[in-house]
Amino acid sequence: MSCTRIGSPILALALALAFSSCRVGPEYSRPEVPTPASFRSVQPEPPASPSLGELEWFKVFNDPTLQSLVRQALSQNYDARIAAERVIAAREFVGVEQSQLLPELQAGGQYTRTKLSEGTGIGSLPGIDKRPSQHSLFGDLSWELDFWGRIRSATDAARAELLATELNRRAVLQTLVCDLSSAYFDLLELDEELRITRETYESRQSSFDLVSLRLDEGVANKVEYRQAESLVLETAGNLPLLESAIESQENLIRILMGTSPGPIPRGAALLEQPREVDVPVGLPSALLDRRPDIGAAEARLISANARIGEAKALLYPTIALTGTGGLVSNDLDELFRGGSSFFDVGPSLVMPIFNAGELRSNIRITEAQQREAALSYQKTLQQAFREVADSLIRRQKITESREWREQLEETLGDQLSLSNDRYLGGVTSYLEVLDSERDHFDSEINLARAIRDELLAYVALYRALGGGWQGTDEDAATGPQVGASTSDLASGM
């Protein structure tokens, strides 16, 4: 039986805990990035002014059919499900790192049987068991005392990487919501084009029938007949192309929903979709906490900063508390009745002496990675400001263009009506009607596309302002919540 004094290890543990605040590595501070007081082309808003990007997605897209499609996509889309699994893996990795802060205890048992040969001399002695056996139960304790904060730095880095993974999942959901909404508006625009083309086909067919009748009566000539016929054939040729495009667009939406290709239900038509006029954008500084890509970039920076502390801690001694103890007996029946017990515990210290500069090179690597992460964060923030500015001016100018196209469509509609009257009155040739027909048809199609573009610009602005992921967890439940933010992580480091 062996036994060590426990006073020394307890004293060592007390000292280690007393100096556990001796943590090496830099403290995190958010890099300073010039932030404008307001976005370009927008007048400064009051600090308390809400932003479009703060709204939940189902409050922005009011079409119930679109909401149903999005909810199905949030629960079934493969990219969303893959992102959720990555969050789960990252969360478990935090548990792996954090577990090193606590002691590790293992238990085991052993049975050995030995045969002593007569030739050894021992086996020939009287009273000696020539087949001795031994039974033992033991436990091992090992505990690395995080004196320099290596394990805590590694845990902080893993926690920051978990947050980055969760924010990446939110970015996936944001992209899914906005992409599916955009695809749905594209589908409605194709429906509108098909409606316009069919009505135009019927109108041109009626005009062709009228010209045919006038030709039979000797009022029209063969050229006018062919001109009217060409309009009918031109419109008829567009119908199959539009029908093909609509089916392909439906298949795209079904893939975003995580299902096989098939038809898509419709809600309100394109012209009935609400188009906001006054859009509050909020303050540029709010993007730091609202856009998931910015938050993920900062979380990666926090992780890289913590890895420096982990690398620097390896330069210092590793202090650990180890122990082993148990019971041992030659007879299994006597193991728990009075078998010999043994116990051994004590601290250990390992100090790096020579490693050819490996540890210091590793520190320089982590410092370079931290600087790279800082630059990536600053680049992501500047890119966000640009995306908002681009989305604002694009939406403004597209709205202006749509208003002009509405006037143009109304004007060309009147021109077409007048041309038909002039032709029927014998004042002009059918060529004027032909030109007016084509101009009016193009104006109707261009107006539908302008309305579509206005809706898409609204979606792009909503996404640029950091909206699109809010409320997704309530509908999808596709992944766990971290319950932390980059500000929380930074304040704890």
Image (cartoon, rainbow, N blue to C red):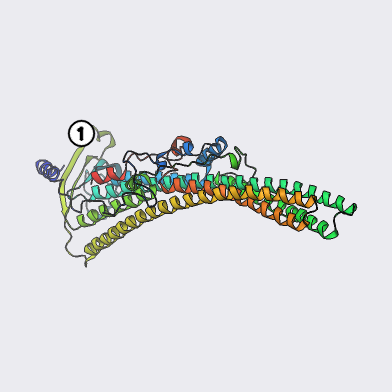
Image quadrant where residue 355 sits = bottom left
The answer to whether residue 132 is seen in the rendering is no
Q: Position of residue 299 (x, y in %)?
A: 32, 49
The three-letter amino acid code for the residue at tag 1 is Gly
Q: Position of residue 56 (x, y in %)?
A: 44, 38
The answer to whether residue 7 is seen in the rendering is yes
**Which element carries disc 1, helix, strand or loop?**
loop
Q: Residues within 10 Å of mark 1 (few under 14, many from 20)?
A: few
Q: Residue lying at the far top in this picture: please name it.
A: 337
Q: Residue lying at the far bottom in this picture: please name it.
A: 356
Residue at (65% x, 48% y) in the render = 193
Using the image as rendered, state which of residue 391 and residue 83 is in the foreground.
Answer: 391
Residue at (9% x, 41% y) in the render = 7
Residue at (17% x, 44% y) in the render = 344
- As drawn, 417 above or below 351: above
Q: Position of residue 277 (x, y in %)?
A: 48, 42
Total labels drawn: 1
Using the image as rendered, state which of residue 218 and residue 119 is in the foreground.
Answer: 218
Image quadrant where residue 229 sits = bottom right
Tell whether 341 sits left or right of 79.
Answer: left
Using the image as rendered, state which of residue 291 and residue 305 is in the foreground.
Answer: 291
Using the image as rendered, state which of residue 183 and residue 176 is in the foreground.
Answer: 183
Q: Position of residue 419 (x, y in %)?
A: 73, 52
- As drawn, 45 above or below 231: above
The N terminus: image quadrant: top left
Q: Residue lying at the far right in this picture: please name it.
A: 217
What residue did someone put label 1 on? Answer: 338
- As drawn, 481 above or below 33: above
